[in-house]
Structures are given as C-alpha cells and as structure tokens.
Image (cartoon, rainbow, N blue to C red):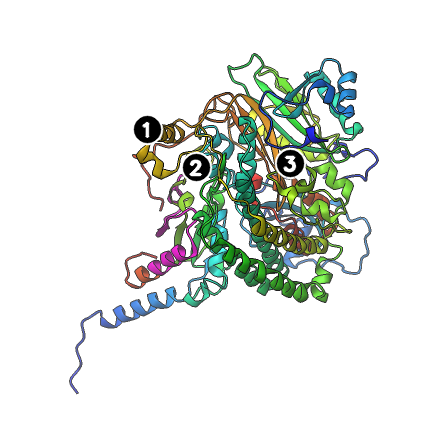
Amino acid sequence: MTDERQVADEGAAEGPSPAEIPDVLAELVARFPEAVYAPSAGQHTLTVSRDDYHPLAEAARDAGFEVCADVTCVDWFRRRPVRFELVVNLLSHRHRLRLRLLVPVPADDPVVPSLTGLWPGANFPEREVFDMFGIVFEGHPDLTRILMPDDWEGHPLRKDFAVGSVPVQFKASHKAT
Amino acid sequence: MAALSFPSNFLTTTIDKAARWARTQSMWPATFGLACCAIEMMATGAAHNDLARFGMEVFRASPRQADLMIVAGRVSQKMAPVLRQVYDQMPDPKWVISMGACASSGGMFNNYALVQGVDEVVPVDMYVPGCPPGPQSLMHGILTLQRMIVEGKVAS
Amino acid sequence: MSDETTTPTVDGGPEVVDIWLSGTEVPPTDEGAQEMAESETEPRLREQLGSVVADDYVDDEVAPEDERMIINMGPQHPSTHGVLRLQLELEGEIIRRSKPIIGYLHTGMEKTAEGLTFAQGPTNVTRMDYLAPLHNELAYSLAVEQLLGIEVPPRAQAIRVLMTELNRVSSHLVALATNGMDIGALSMMLYGFRERELILEFFEKTTGLRMNHNYIRPGGVAVDLPPGWRRDVARIVETIPARIQDYEDLLAENPIWLSRTKGVGVITAEECLAYGITGPILRSTGVDWDLRKAFPYSGIDQYEFDVPTGTNGDVYDRFLIRMEEIRQSIRIVDQVAETMPKGDYRVDDRKVTPPPRARIDESMEALIHHFKIFTEGFRVPPGETYVAVESPRGELGCYLVSDGGGKPWRMHIRAPSFYNLQALPVMMADTLVADTIATIASLDPVMGDVDR
C-alpha cells in the first residue's frame, strides 16, 4: 500500500486519487455522506461536521482505527468563516493506515463531544486543547487546565493572545532578594 | 613576655576566611534540574567530568541538606512558586547558580510561559551562559563561584 | 472520595482505570506542601502524633475511605525525571489512585514556532524532547519537506539515519542510567553517562553542540560529516556493544534487579492501544509496532534491523528492550557507515537551502538567496500535514499547517511522553509506592516533551 506511506515525494496538490482510497475509508465515507474526503500532501483527511464527529469516530474505531494518535486544534482567526478546526489523527495498526479528521468548531459555541469514551488516551490532549484554545469537550471526566497554572486567564494558543514577549534591551529586571 | 600585639581583627579574619574556604570545599547542590541543562548537569556529575573532586560529592534531594541550588533549565510560570519555596527551604549559607540561557534570561523563549530570568524569583550569585552549557562551562562557573566565596566577594 | 463519572472502557477490552478527578471534595494542596488534617482530634493525626496506636493485627479487607492519605510527589523530586508532579492516594503503602500533574515545564514552544521561520523551526523544536533532539528536528524537517514537495538527496537521508540512530543509543543510555540509579544500582548511572560521552563527542564534532544540535534542517542537514567520521563511528560501533553486554551481565540476572522489576508496572496491549501509548512500552506488551518498519522514512528501510518485543509489559521487559534497541541501532549505524552514499548533503534548491558560504562572495544571486532565506524565510505552499518518526520514546509526530507564508500557521508536536504519561495511573493502580519509582523510570518520560 504505497499511498499510505509517508514519503516526502509527492507535491502538495497530489495525493491518492478517489480510485485509490482504501476500502475501509471508502466505507466510512459511504456511511457518512456529509463527510468530505480530501487528500492532503499524500495523506487521507476527512472534514466532518460537529454532529457527525463522534459517530464517525466511533465507526472508525470499530472499523479498525485502534489508536487515537493525536487531538489538536488550529485557530483560523479571521482567515476562515469558522474559527477553530479540531484535528484528530487516527492510526490503524491493522490496516497500516492513518486518517485525519478535521472538525470545524465555531468560536461562539466551542463545544465538541469528547472522545474519551472511545479512546481513554484522548484525555490529556483534549485537556490541552481546552487549555490552549478554550474548546469545551462534553463528557470529558476532568476538563481542567493542564499546562498553564490553574488560575491562568486566557487561552495562549489563540491568535489573539499575544506571545507575551518582554522587550529585551531595556528589561528592567529588579533583583529579587 | 611581651604581649604580642596583633591587629584587632587578625584572628577573626583568618577564621572567617577558613570558614568560607571550608564551605566551598563541600558545597552540596540541591537537585533542581528542570530541562536540557539538567542532563548536562548530570553529565558534569558523572564520571567523565567529575564534580565530586571539587567537593560536590552528592546532589541532595532535600533542600534542607543543600547549600547550592543550580537552577538548570527553563522556569515556567507554574514552576516559579515551587522554585521560590525550595530556595526558602534551604538553610543559610546558600548560593544560587543560574545555569543556561533560559535560567539566566529566558533564553530563546521570550514568551508568556517562562519567567524571563530566574533572578526575578531568587537572588542569583553566578550566571553560566550556554544552551546548554557544556560540563566544562558549568565547572568553570562553579569554581569561579567557589573562588569568589573564598575571597569574600559573594555574600552568602 | 466517590466519583460520579463512568469509567471509560474500550469495547471488548479490560476496564481501564479512570483518571482521578480534580476538584473533588479534597481541598487542593499548596504547591509542594502536604496538607495536614484540619483538627487535632482527627483520628489520622492522632495516630501520627502517637497518642493513638493503630492496631496492626486488624485485617481489614475493605478499608474505610478516610484512611486514605493523599501524598504529593514532586515537582522537585530526584526520581521524577524532570518536573513531574504526582498526586497519589495511598492506603498504607498501596497506591489506590494516582494523577500526574504536568505543566511545570511548559515553554510555549508551539506559540514560539508561529513566530519563527521554517528554517529557524528546528532550533525551537529540538529543545522539546531534549534527550533525542535530532528526532524532533527530523519530524519537523520531514513535515516541512512534505509540504514543500521536495525530496532530500540520498546522502542527506543516510546522514539523518546515522545521527538519529546514534541519538537513539544516547537516549536509551540515559534511560538505562536513570533507571538503574532510581532502583538503586548507582553505578549504572556512571556507566550510562560514560558511554554517552563517546556519542556526544561525535555529535559535537559533527554538529557543533553536544545537545540541541539544530543539525537536521528542512532540505537536508546543516553541514557535511567531518573528515575522519568513519574512524569515530567505528570506535563507537566497537565499544558500545561490549559495554552493553557488561551491563546486561550486571543487571539482567541480578536477583535484586529481577525482584524490583519483574511484574512491576504492568500494562496490557489493549490498554496501550486505547491510551495511544507507543514506543518501547507498547513493544514490551508484545505488539510489534515500530514506525521505522510500518511507515518508513528517510530511507531507513534499506537497512536491516530487528525490532525487539517483550511479553509481559513490565519494567524488566522494557529494560531488556531498550538494551536490545541499542544493539539494533548500532547495527544500523554500522550499515550506514559502510554504505554511505556520496553526493549532496542538502537539496540543491536555492530557494530552500542557503548557498555555501564561499559562493556568497562570488555570486549576487547566492547573496540574495542567503539574505532572503535568513531574514524572510522561504515560503511554503499552503497545506497541512502530519509526519511521525520513531523516537526513543515512541511516535513523535509533527502536525504542520502552512498558510503560504514564511512562518508556520500552526505547528503541533505529537509528543510521545505526553501520551505515555497516561499509562502511569494504569500501571500504578494497586501497587506499592516503591514500585512507582521503577515504573516512572521505565516509562522514560521527558518533561520537555510532555509540556512543550
């Protein structure tokens, strides 16, 4: 299955053509007709709506995606109509396949169902997305800040959160005693 | 027998200097390795570059038994109160070496997450630059600190 | 302490331990301080003060809930491999629940990456997993190259394999050293770091730095291997297997080592898959999954090597696996040194890789390219990609999103230790406190990776 190998030999616009989609993915797409399949730099991605997200993830897990490799988020601030995009990387040992789910999440209602019921390992990454972006995961057993202190205000990886750099040349460093 | 007359602080000065020398010859660091610099600190204590020959026989885990705190690595906002608490738990005399660029000034991470320089939290006696400083740099920093303590240039 | 949430389970798998809630009825403790009981008439406190003696002979199968004690371990602790804080709920010496609390080394690297150009990216990324810096750089560089649509020349790929496999050896040596020291074999610490010095000397000769090299960059590697590298690599390949054999003889059949590591920190394959745990931990449960074989990268499939697996999923298996992985990595390094192809050490595309310094004096284009690459950075076409490499800790992936500019729009590193830490509550449930140290050491977490 050479299409699934991650070799840096394909251009960004190329990817497996629809005829080369592996069967397991074709079945998933058939069950969820609203999910949009797109090859991205030689990898399989499915853009899913928020309502289809949890059912599709469950179907993927039953179809052989035993491992949830990563849950993260992208903030398309002012670039796209829907602000956040949740990105879930699934991995199947059985089929030697990776699948990426992209879920648009609006800024005014950043609530998404949690994947911890399907993959308990999604616990920490979902907490990190909550901490860094402010997306609330429904059904998560312990949705608290994980990287920042508990009383931190703001969500650092959002584009409207400043980097917080200190001007170096004239940094007035008061010496502690 | 005529009384030998010494300057009034002769004996005290010698004892002071001897005491300072004795302190430096057996400074035990507290383990405060945070990030990459911690690995280089461990390498400095390991066999190839041996810190024990300079008196740092053991790295004490308990701050109550340590004299020197080598802040090795980047100090995040969450860690800063812990750093201060460990420093406060160390009994006098104590010294602080800020090892590496991140501890000295925030390093390459000039952002919201790090304390820009550990001297915002604890008073630092020696800054060792590097990212990470090799064992030789760290040893140079430690030996310079020891010399400065003996000469009385560093308050303890 | 009762928790009202349902225990998440995997279909058909064993019931996995729930992650301990925060914000339960127990008041939060101060950083580093242990909260004592509130009133002097508290039964636990009276026992501790000695005014009441606990009856040792009472055999109580189900201990009442208020006999449990919450202990905080870390973040400043000699054996937590960095600033990991563990909250343990103990019943005597047995851990009933545990929760890792992280974030003490959070450096905002993903935010920093959005302000650095793609060429500056490796400097930032290399400091995440600081024991395997070349792997971080490799994942990032592969992701950038995939978005750029370029392929690096064979010599660059071979150099990358050489450096990353040596890095795997040096990382596993630290893991073995700290594993030994934590369990009590203090001399293992010195031996591990002695071997590591050999490799770090080679790294310093080639890349300029002992750690955090910034050597593997998008487009290839920064500089070519120095003259005489074959001799240095041959020396490493000769010395290390013999010394590893020494350590195996020292520890592998040692009764103390066996009793402290066999059957300790056990995890099953289903739990590993459910928690997203990869690397030596997954392989110790018997699952034969290594990204170098499953999704080969950087030409590593040309070299012959085996992937060791264990059977029990305990600390002892992981110890043996790491030793064997060192041997296999040396095997790969030997093959790379013999078959190193000649050629360019970086892609010839002047828009991506800077021209050689000598050319800058001669050619105006070279000067302009150099200037543009180092100030504005090269532009990467819009897109997103995820590339994963097999780091000594597991699957290290880089998810990179570019909007067409010179800096990443979003860079996320899928850190193996972040996921592997979720195995801790599973492994430590209903085990002794003393086994915690061995378990954490065998997980080999690197907090820079966890917190980024």
Disc 1 marks a residue whose amino acid type is Met
Secondary element at image label 1: helix
Residue on which the image places disc 2: B109
The crowd level at tag 2 (other Cα within 10 Å; few <14, some 14-19, many 20+) is: many
Dot 1: few (<14), some (14–19), or many (≥20) neighbours within 10 Å? few
Residue at the image point whose x is 36% and y is 38% from the top = C357
Gap between marks 2 and 1 measured at Cα: 34 Å
Callout 3 touching callout 1 (CB < 8 Å): no
Q: Which residues are magenta?
A: B116-145
Residues C200 and C429: in front is C200
From the top left corner, tell me how far across and down residue C165 is, in percent: 58, 48
Q: Which quadrant would residue C18 be assigned to in this image?
A: top right
**Mark 2 or mark 1, which is nearer to you?**
1
Where is mark 3, residue-wise? Answer: C22
Q: Amino acid at mark 3?
A: Ser
Read off the chain for label 3: C
- Does residue C157 show up? yes
The residue that label 1 is drawn on is C364
